[in-house]
């Protein structure tokens, strides 16, 4: 199917729009580390159920040592460091602005994709990436009174967290793609193909559909371990904070929504998207989330949308269109 990977990437962008809105509310009520630990636990439970349906057992099958190594490393970069920084960014500058800085994932993924797996990008795709980044960047710059120069109108600490989150997301995705390549090789070594259906499967789902979810589970295992360690080390009175978070029904609902559209659906489909298109292209389409989030954030959080942000969104969409020429 033409542009199948790009279509999947667009679905991921919409999914991450929803999860970002849930995450902003939930992380502000719970705190970054308890929120991440709770939603990662929920995600692993859902993924374990998916593994039972796909493989007949509650854990990934066929993965060898190299597969686990790369996907666990991806979990450290993308989940432990990236999601921690992202939630901190949401707390300080909100999900709409936090997502804007996730556009740094596109050049990060393109550069690492070139270095680690030899991916190439067409000239128009490279231009499209920079046009998209420029358009989204316009949304976070503003002029002060009696000053013709543009200034960053956001707290620098929030920008630092959000920028680090964007870089880690791009790096985590490339590491995941390397892990998926090893996973494919391990499956072939078992005498299976991407269209094979495991003997113990409860539903006849081919491996090319279920493997991204299995890979997400491996990343999530490292994510949960990392968040629990960080919480016990960095959070004073973490048990009380965690217990209070669990009793907050609204925050738990937000954690569930963020988990469903983020680590479970969004991340799994993002891994699938990278199987059908270049990592840099997928990451740039994922970068549309800051554009998609403008309207719902304005409605839900009563945020003012400026003309510059609208123009930035239009330029961003135009940049993505260059990928399909």
Image (spheres, helix red, strand yellow):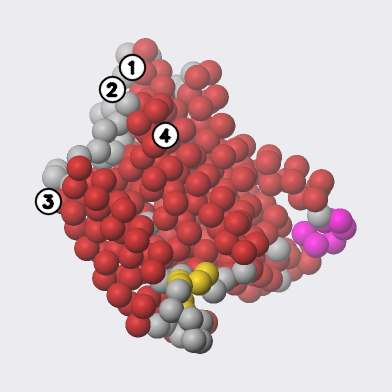
First in residue order: circle 3 vs circle 4: 4
Is residue 77 left or right of 51 when viewed as pictured? right
Residue drawn 62% across and 64% down? 156
| Up/down of 313 relative to 44, above or below | below
Labels 1 and 4 touching (C-beta < 8 A): no
- Pinpoint residue 190: horizontal percent, then vertical percent: 38, 14
SS for callout 2: loop
Residue drawn 50% across and 46% down? 167
Is residue 202 left or right of 43 when viewed as pictured? left
Which label is found at residue 112?
Answer: 4
Mark 1 and mark 4: span between their CA atoms? 26 Å
Would you name the residue on which mark 2 appears? 193
Residue drawn 48% across and 24% down? 67
First in residue order: circle 1 vs circle 4: 4
Mark 3 and mark 4: span between their CA atoms? 24 Å
Q: Residues within 10 Å of mark 1 (few under 14, many from 20)?
A: few
Residue 51 seen by the camera: no
First in residue order: circle 2 vs circle 3: 2
Assign the N terminus to one quadrant of the image.
top left
Would you name the residue on which mark 3 appears? 325
Residue 237 is inside the magenta segment: yes
First in residue order: circle 4 vs circle 2: 4
Would you name the residue on which mark 1 appears? 188
SS for callout 1: helix
| Foreground disc of the pair 4, 2 | 4
Is residue 232 left or right of 144 when viewed as pictured? right
| Foreground disc of the pair 2, 3 | 3
- Pinpoint residue 18: horizontal percent, then vertical percent: 44, 66
Residue 299 seen by the camera: yes
Q: Residues within 10 Å of mark 2 (few under 14, many from 20)?
A: some
Q: Which region is colored magenta?
A: 236-242
């Amino acid at each position: 199917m033409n542009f199948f990977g790009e279509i999947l990437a667009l679905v991921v962008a919409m999914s991450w729009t929803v999860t970002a809105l849930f995450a902003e509310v939930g992380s502000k009520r719970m705190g970054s580390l308890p929120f991440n630990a709770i939603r990662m636990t929920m995600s692993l439970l859902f993924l374990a159920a998916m593994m039972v349906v796909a493989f007949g057992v509650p854990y990934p099958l066929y993965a060898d040592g190299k597969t686990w190594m790369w996907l666990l490393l991806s979990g450290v970069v993308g989940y432990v460091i990236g999601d921690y920084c992202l939630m901190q960014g949401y707390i300080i500058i909100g999900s709409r602005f936090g997502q804007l800085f996730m556009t740094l994932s596109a050049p990060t993924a393109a550069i690492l994709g070139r270095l680690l797996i030899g991916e190439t990008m067409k000239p128009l795709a490279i231009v499209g990436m920079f046009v998209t980044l420029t358009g989204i960047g316009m949304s976070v710059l503003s002029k002060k009174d009696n000053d013709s120069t543009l200034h960053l109108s956001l707290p620098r600490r929030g920008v630092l967290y959000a920028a680090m989150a964007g870089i880690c997301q791009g790096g985590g995705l490339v590491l995941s793609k390397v892990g998926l390549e090893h996973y494919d090789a391990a499956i072939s070594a078992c005498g299976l193909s991407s269209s094979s259906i495991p003997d113990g499967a409860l539903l006849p789902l081919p491996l090319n559909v279920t493997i991204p979810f299995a890979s997400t589970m491996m990343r999530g295992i490292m994510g949960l371990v990392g968040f629990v360690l960080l919480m016990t080390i960095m959070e004073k009175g973490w048990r009380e904070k965690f217990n209070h978070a669990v009793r907050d029904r609204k925050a738990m609902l937000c954690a569930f929504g963020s988990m469903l559209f983020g680590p479970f659906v969004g991340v799994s489909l993002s891994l699938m998207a990278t199987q059908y298109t270049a990592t840099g292209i997928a990451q740039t389409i994922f970068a549309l989330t800051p554009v998609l989030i403008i309207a719902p954030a304005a409605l839900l959080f009563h945020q003012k949308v400026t003309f510059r942000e609208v123009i930035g969104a239009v330029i961003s969409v135009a940049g993505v269109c260059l990928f399909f020429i």
